[in-house]
Image (cartoon, helix red, strand yellow):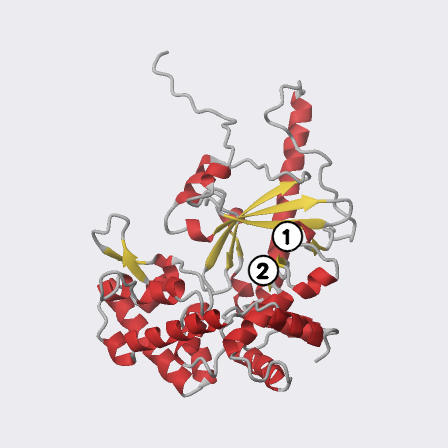
Amino acid sequence: MVLENYEKYVQEFLDEDFYSATDNENYESAIKEFQLRYSPEKIENMTIDEYIYGEVKGKSGFFYTLTRDTEIVGRVGNRPEFAGVYYSKDKKKVIKDPKSKKYGATVDEVFSTYKRRMIEIYNAAIAMDDETLQSIEFPPTFKYKMAAMYNPDSYFTVFSTRHLQNFLVEMKQDNSYRENFKHFDLIKELLNEKDNYLLTEKMSNHKYSRLLYYLFGKVKEDWSIQELGVVRKDKGEKKISNFDIQLPVVKDTNNNLIKAPEKNFDYSSNKRISQKDLENQLKEQKVRGAIAEEKVLEYEKERLKTIGLSNKIEDIKQVSKENAAAGYDILSFNEDGTKRYIEVKSTNSEQNTFYLSINELKFSEKDEFKEDYWIYFVRKTTNEFLIKEIRNPFLDGRRELLNIQPTDFKIDMKFG
């Protein structure tokens, strides 16, 4: 243990009762009920209805029980590709998620593969076979939570590898933990720290995970702060946006700094502008956009490296070079290995204002892409480029926060 004042922080966590007896009772109850409802035999015989809606009226199906109803154990996303199969919006038919095609060509094949993998996860978790568990191809956080549900004494209720890395970076003040560590190796090291310290050795794994979040908070995939822990708060740190992530300046082949335009071109302005000035500004915008895409490519390579997806770096594509009408600029990957569609917007302003083509808007709203659509703002300061990630602002529940104004109109004349 390297962290200064660790004992003080742990004692504060215990004294303030951040993890109550009721929390523990609810946690144990959730684990017990899940194990009773979803034994390997019941998973094997489970129907799609039981998987999605539940076998008893008023009870959620397997997917929502694991991802939503047992949040007391730990949170994971409930995105469609995690489920593999789900009902259409009108509830009239079962469809398979476009990203689940590697699990089968039909709904039945995908569901059969999912059930088989879930039983494999159960067997590996009970046997504490980390190597097999690591190798099972399945959405990672979904898999890690299943392991903790079936064997809570051996597996941790933290399902993000990035969060585990952050805990050890902060606890040991050692940035080497940002490198590619296996999920279960990180867990073992953290549990070893727990068992070798008097105030934590008798804590349940669940209570200890709560302590770690209390101490160190949460970070995003790019290591920017998502939620401050008490350690950072005591240092006077504040929650920061991804604009604080700094990347190297762009240089040309002669090592000269390439300067982006000093001002944004305001299409809504009524200011007069000559044809030559307009052409120059549009040319500058094109240069700025190209530079921004290059910086996002660099940024994504580093992001994939830090989240343990170095094997995916070669698969990143600058789609805009091949297809300007694709609806996005760069194809990358999420933490769980699924595709991420990135639209790059360059700006010299700190305002979250951007222009979007109708083609880009339509792409962002497509059911098969909208959950994985991101806008990356690239802002040029005096000598560096800062990147801000924004998940699809057109998702349900976020659209009312937008002020959308038309800047161009298509007019079809019915005369002449």
Image quarter (top left, top right, bottom left or bottom right) of the C terminus: top left
Which kind of residue does numbered mark 2 sit on? Lys
- Secondary structure, mark 2, is loop
- Residue 220 is marked as 2
Label 2 crowd (10 A; few <14 / some 14-19 / many >=20): some
Could you tell me residue 288's position as x and y percent? 66, 41
> As displayed, is residue 42 above or below residue 239?
below
Could you tell me residue 172's position as x and y percent? 70, 76
- Residue 95 found in image quarter: bottom left
Work out whether residue 318 or residue 51 is closer to the camera in this orientation and state it.
51
Work out whether residue 123 or residue 318 is closer to the camera in this orientation and state it.
123
Residue at 47% over, 73% down: 24
- Residue 242 is marked as 1
Could you tell me residue 272's position as x and y percent? 66, 18
Which kind of residue does numbered mark 1 sit on? Asn
Q: Could you tell me if the residues under marks 1 and 2 are in contact, i.e. CB atoms within 8 Å? A: yes
- Secondary structure, mark 1, is helix
Residue at 61% over, 53% down: 296
Tell me how far mark 1 sits from mark 2, CA to CA: 9 Å
Q: State left or right for residue 378 relative to residue 327.
A: right
Q: State left or right for residue 261 relative to residue 142.
A: right
- Residue 238 found in image quarter: bottom right
Q: Is residue 308 visible?
A: no
Q: Earlier in the sequence, mark 1 or mark 2?
A: 2
Residue at 51% over, 29% down: 405
Q: State left or right for residue 80 relative to residue 47.
A: right
Q: Is residue 124 visible?
A: yes
Label 1 crowd (10 A; few <14 / some 14-19 / many >=20): some
Could you tell me residue 219's position as x and y percent? 60, 62
Work out whether residue 213 or residue 187 is closer to the camera in this orientation and state it.
213
> As displayed, is residue 101 above or below residue 183?
above
